[in-house]
Amino acid sequence: MRNEIIDDDRSEIITGELLRRFHRLIGKNLGKEFGATPGRFRKRHVVVGQVYRAPDAQHVNDLIDAFCQWSLKEFHYQKGQDFSTAVIQAIVSHVYIAWIHPFDDGNGRTARLLEFYLLLRAGVPDLAAHILSNHYNQTRNEYYRQLKSLQKKKGDLSDFISYALQGFKDGLSEVLKTVQKSQMEVAWNAHVHQTFVQFASMHGSRPVERRRKSLILSFLLDQEYAIDEIAAINEPIRVQYENLSRRTLQRDIDALQVMGLLKLDSQSGKYRAWSGILQGQMAHVRDSRILH
């Protein structure tokens, strides 16, 4: 769907037609479950949640045009836009679509899709462009409370922006952790394979080498395991060792320790994958990038 939302060679400004296109994307396969004509602004008056009365239908086109013109001037995308301005524009645009409520159905989804588009347009990776939408879903009660409170604040969006920015910040931290964890796992797998090449002569046979390699690659990098837990660390490992002696398992563990891939914690008496050397190397790389 990303390719339907944004063309990498052609970034668009916000227009009524862009909003209608996003709405068509949302409703195109929903049939009767979608309470609106995809891509058409509403022709009737609506009350949202028996609380908020949206602007009269005859004003929708003018309000959307005014919003698009104001957004173009206020956030100056065509003249150059920094990252923080793009994020604020995404948040504010979400609120304005919720306020105007231009469609009979799918307004929240259209607002989130517009927000997603603006973040993509600003260069936010796909993995992070969902953060605001996820934040609203995960804090749904607070989201609706924030929207409702805007009615009393006469257009002051500062509290909603603060709420959204905090969610964006927290989400970015989680994305960073996910990326770093993925990088560590890739680096660890490469390190394991390279180490087995270096110690190829110590295993005696290819089946033994494969068994030991599959064992160490089954360890989660942030977990410790007692020896009984290692034998059943996952189903393939359980099957691998079910007809082998405990002594064989211990020999495999000892070999992995000699190779520097496994470490015994003297206090807990448990084993863990020894990825400490990689963590130090990756931290050094990150520090070098920051300094340069």
Image (cartoon, grey):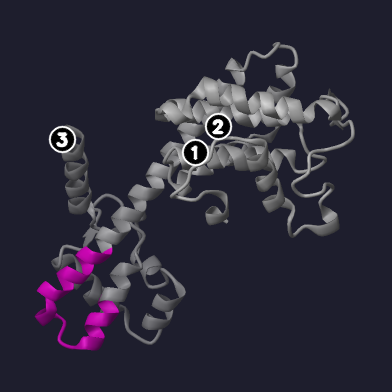
The residue singled out by tag 1 in the image is 119
Q: Which label's residue is closer to the chain start, 3 or 2?
A: 2
Amino acid under label 1? Leu
Q: Nearer the viewer, residue 12 or 205?
A: 12
The residue singled out by tag 3 in the image is 292
> Do the CB atoms of the residues marked 1 and 2 lie less than 8 Å apart?
yes
Marks 3/2: CA distance? 31 Å
Q: How many marks?
A: 3
Q: Nearer the viewer, residue 145 or 16?
A: 16
User: What label does residue 90 carry, if any?
Assistant: 2
Tell me the magenta residue range. Answer: 189-212
Q: Quadrant of residue 219?
A: bottom left
Q: Nearer the viewer, residue 169 or 195?
A: 169
> Residue 191 location, x and y as percent?
20, 64
> Residue 101 location, x and y as percent?
76, 32
**What main secondary structure does the magenta stretch of the protein show?**
helix
Amino acid under label 2? Ala
